[in-house]
Amino acid sequence: KFEAYIAYSLMLTGFVYPVVVHSIWSSSGFLSAFTDDENKFLGSGMIDFAGSGVVHMTGGITALIAAKILGPRIGRFYDADGNELAEPVSFPPHSVALQVLGTFILWVGWYGFNPGSTLGISPAGYADVAALCAVTTTLAAAAGSVSAMFTDMVMTRKATGETMYDITMCMNGALSGLVGITAGCSVCEPWAALVIGIVAGWVYIFWSNLLVKLKIDDAVDAIPVHFGNGMWGCIATGLFASPGLVDNAYGTPNYGWFYNWGMGNGTGKLLAVEIIGVLFIIGWVGLIMIPYFMLLNAMGLFRVDALEEEVGLDISHHKGAAYDLSGPSEDVKEKYEISTSQRKLVVPADDGEENA
């Protein structure tokens, strides 16, 4: 219901996000990498440069909780009488072209989201950080797009014997790569961004299939993109953060676990902080939003009734369908056919014929 949108938006932006943001991004946050060296958690602090965890994972876990409590759409996993269907029913998008357009709008917007998180360009070193963010963002998105589409193609061919390329997988794979690189875009080398993007495509496919098995209905696969890859983005930073780039952006002595392992010390402090940050976000959001959504549901403010769902919320909530696909009425068609049949085609005479 529209009331539920308003209610949970107020709760999320007023009480949930501020705590997560303060804890990880504020100079006084307990997980922040921006505090003084002696106050950094495990001597490192959590690196989440543009918000794989703070932004995307927080929204993704909220969506997971909401989808579970709300329940699936009628006809997705169960029929109108509540009987389980033999196979889940897919609801195809109304316009793949608009889906592609929306994805590329988001992709371009990410160049403000990631490089823009430097919060400046003129101070020394800031331009280098912003430029790196733009490069890693591009590579991860492209890698995620290719990874998800071709992995899905291979899986489909193995299951059905047919080779098909799913544009939806391609687009959601790109978004997954974007979410996955958001935490470490300023501290990962370009080659690592490619790896993070490739894995992000696989993470998306895993979570998308897992939700179907669990009969959790995510109409646009927001949970795999934002929650699944929000987690992956934080963990990937703990693995791939480069020493020189971390020093440049944060000035912390803790780097990605792969680099520490390669140096022979095996220290995983940054990776540990990233995992703790992931668990903190899950715990805090769950603590607030699970009882909140359950309360909305118990009060009858969460889900529309079955008739409204069948008619569609564009009609029941927004004064009409978003797309008029009805076409002209039969009466109008008949009048048009009569009109065209009565028209006379006049062919102008040739100059030579007039002279004759």
Image (cartoon, rainbow, N blue to C red):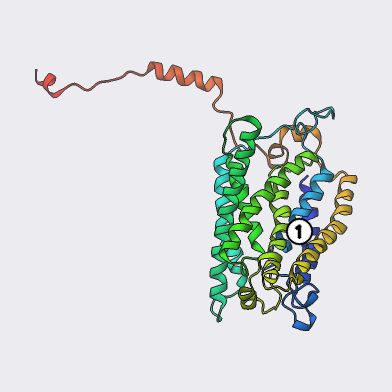
Q: Secondary structure at mark 1?
A: helix
Q: Amino acid at mark 1?
A: Thr
Say which quadrant the N terminus sits in.
top right
Q: Quadrant of residue 266?
A: bottom right
Closest to the observer: 337 or 27?
27
Q: Position of residue 119 (x, y in %)?
A: 61, 73
Binning the other alpha carbons within 10 Å of mark 1 as few (below 14), some (14 to 19) or many (20 upward) gives: many
Say which quadrant the C terminus sits in.
top left
Residue at 84% x, 27% y: name it. 81
- Side of 277 relative to 351 (left or right): right
Q: Position of residue 31 (x, y in %)?
A: 78, 72
Q: Position of residue 105 (x, y in %)?
A: 56, 53
Residue at 69% x, 78% y: name it. 252
Residue matched to label 1? 58
Residue that sits furthest to the front in the current view: 264
Residue that sits furthest to the left in the current view: 356
Residue 334 visible, this angle: yes
Q: How many marks?
A: 1
Closest to the observer: 294 or 207?
207
Q: Position of residue 136 (x, y in %)?
A: 57, 63
Closest to the observer: 281 or 98?
281
Q: Is residue 184 above or below residue 299?
A: below
Residue 302 visible, this angle: no
Q: Is residue 349 above or below residue 111?
A: above
Q: Quadrant of residue 79?
A: top right
Residue at 78% x, 62% y: name it. 278
Residue at 53% x, 69% y: name it. 131
